[in-house]
Image (cartoon, grey):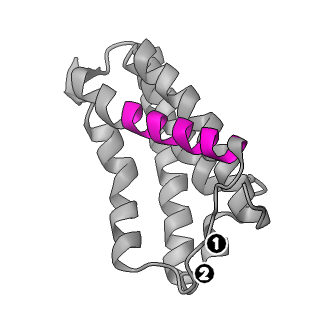
Amino acid sequence: MNIGNGWILPLLIMAPNCLYFLFPAGAPLEVQNTGKTGRIMTILERAGQAGVVVTPFFYSISCGTLIEKVLIAAAVLFLLFYYAGWLRYFLKGRHLRLLYEPMLKIPLPMAVSPLMCFFAGAVFLSSIPLFISAIVLSIGHLYNSYKAYSGERV
């Protein structure tokens, strides 16, 4: 049973980011990618972002098998956890550290939860390109998020 287009996945993940641009943190984060590794990780992050946004447009979401239902439920749970992180950020004063501090003992929850949602989406969409894009995004995004949280220059 086809329940929708794959583009809904990146749309739901990116929606809270639009609010961030309207209501940014009090003190913007200055991540300076001065080193070769930092520049490479940022390139990987941007390439992965492009892949996870564009690739789902070529897929339809189906919900026929039990495994598809489980994966969609997992993606929804990761998405709800991500939204909870955004709520924490907006309700507790929009401090940038809230985007990186652990939630429920999960480190970098605002980086990990959307990545897990993309991985679940890649599997339930049966999309190897989306899975590869999620891997590329994970490498760059987790590195840059960790560096931003630790205050290190990358």
Q: Is residue 128 above or below residue 73?
A: above
Residue carrying label 2: 95
Residue 37 coordinates in the image, percent (x, y): 71, 41
Q: Position of residue 80 (x, y in %)?
A: 48, 53
Q: Is residue 49 left or right of residue 81?
A: left
The secondary structure type at the circle numbered 1 is helix
Residue lying at 33% horizontally and 57% vertically, measured from the top left: 15
Looking at the rendered image, the quarter that the C terminus falls into is: bottom right
Circles 2 and 1: CB distance less than 8 Å? yes
Question: What is the three-letter code of the residue carrying label 2?
Answer: His
Is residue 74 shown above or below 31? above
Q: Which residues are magenta?
A: 37-52
Q: Is residue 51 magenta?
A: yes
Q: Which residue is mark 1?
A: 98
In the picture, measured across the screen, residue 143 lies left or right of residue 86, that is: right
Left or right of 47 on screen, residue 141: right
Characterize the local packing of mark 2: few (<14), some (14-19) or many (20 or more) Cα atoms within 10 angstroms: some
The reply, left or right, for residue 98 in relation to residue 9 is right
